[in-house]
Structure formats: structure tokens, C-alpha cells
Amino acid sequence: MYKNKKISVILPTYNEKDSIRKVVNDFNQLGIIDEIIVINNNAAAGTSEEVAKTKAREVFEPIQGYGAAIKRGFKESTGELVVVCEPDDTFLAADILKFLAYCEDVDIVYGTRTVSHFIWEGANMGVFLKWGNWATAKLMEVIFNTNYLSDVGCTYRLISRKALNSILPVLCVNSNFFGPEMMIRGFQLHLKAIQIPVNYKDRIGTSSVTGDLKKAFFLGLKMIILIIGLRFNLGAKFIRLLERI
């Protein structure tokens, strides 16, 4: 717990069989996490066996997509503070302490991977991914008049239970551009947020998205289209169409 507040950690998994046990144990060893939930989103064979060796609770989400997995995790979580992280070992579990340092002042704390001093050697954050995420974040910052943003793709974040209860009903995206939607919905609801730098390492295994430059490029385009579409209050039908492209 943190200051008598229960902490839940959500780890959505698809292709992280070789790293998920390490990541769960890294969070558990901090001694402050009350609940770790692994959302098995049609994950690679052998993933469940690895999770069974840990203290995490595994939940199966059949609807394919990062957003579907995170929303399921939000619904399953019971903590007053809910943390989302990738189980591919690109992030440091200990960085959760940075998020906790801000959680009393804001509703949501987002991570950013674009600060050079925090990008480790071997991390998948080349020129295209770094500046693409930065430029898309700046687009969001300008058209929604938000606080400072420098990364729309960082999946390490913390949200309070009160904020989660208000934002969950309006979340629509099931696919890989869920991250920007969560950010925009929060700003539309006037939730207080801040973005802070986190360590970003070389992942174990290959990403199903950012490991392919072509896929990463088209995901970036969808993020931009989503940001512009939500600025004009386009709804669920627009999002479903974007997900099918």
C-alpha cells in the first residue's frame, strides 16, 4: 500500500511469455503492490504457465486488442491507485515510486520515454519513434490545450480510482491506439494530469507493433486521425471505422 491506499498493477500480455514472470516478480519485490493482474489477451502459448509461477492473478480477455485488455484490467482492479505497465521488461518497476510521488496532486500520471537521459542503450526508441511520438503529443497538446506532453505511446501510467470511475464509461478504443484516447478523454473530463520521464530499456522478445517500422508508422497515423477526430467530437462509429482500417 501507499499511504493507506491499495495499489493495483495491470499487465496486459500478448507476446511476453519470456519476460512476464520477471516483470511480475520485479513489481512484487517492491513490497508496496497489493494486487497484480495479468490480462491474457490471446497470449502466446506458455504464458499462463509462466504467470502461474508468480503471485499475479490471470484474467482472460478474448476481445483482441491492447485497449480491450486494459479496459478489462481496469474493471478487474480493486485498488485506489491503478497502474498500467507493459510486461516486456522495457520499463523499471521501481519507477512506480515516481508516479506515486505525484498521485496526491493529480488524477493521472503519464510516463514519457522521449527524454534522452532515460533511454537505455538498445531500447527501441530510434529517431522515428522518438520524434514521431513527440510530434503527435504536441498535436494533442495544442489542439486540446493540455499541460506539457512529449509522448503519446508510453503505456506506463497511474490513475486514481475516482478518476478511473469517471473515465471508464467513455473509453471506446479496443486496439493499439487506446493510449491517446485515454489521455484525451481525461483532458475532456478536466482531470488533472502530468507527464514524467521514465526509464526505457531494450525489451525481451519482439514487439508485435513497434518491432515493425511499417506497422509503427500506420499506428502513428491512426493516432493522429484519432486526435483530430476526437477534437471534433466524432463518436464510437468513427473509432470502430478507424479500428477496421
Image: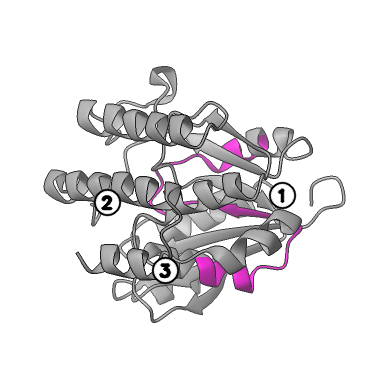
For the residues labelled 1 and 3, say whether their Cβ atoms are less than 8 Å apart: no
Amino acid on which the number 3 mark rests in the picture: Ala
Relative image position of residue 105 (x, y in whole percent): 77, 35
Q: Is residue 130 above or below residue 8?
A: above
Q: Does the magenta run of residues contain 34?
A: no
- The picture quadrant where one finds residue 15 is bottom left
Amino acid on which the number 1 mark rests in the picture: Gly
Relative image position of residue 177 (x, y in whole percent): 36, 54
Considering depth in this image, is 220 or 228 the residue closer to the camera?
228
Q: Which quarter of the rendered picture does the C terminus lie within?
A: bottom left
| In this rendering, position of residue 28 left or right of residue 202 | right
In the rendered structure, find residue 236 and report the number of the disc placed on it: 3
Disc 2 residue crowd, few under 14, some 14–19, many 20+, Cα 10 Å: some
In the rendered structure, find residue 31 and report the number of the disc placed on it: 1
**Residue found 52% across the figure and 77% down from its top:** 59
- Tell which circle, 2 or 3, labels the residue nearer the N-terminal end: 2
**Residue found 50% across the figure and 51% down from its top:** 85
Which residues are drawn in magenta?
71-97
Element type at marker 1? Answer: loop
Amino acid on which the number 2 mark rests in the picture: Lys
In the rendered structure, find residue 222 and report the number of the disc placed on it: 2
Colour mapping used in the image:
one colour
Q: Does the magenta run of residues contain 72?
A: yes
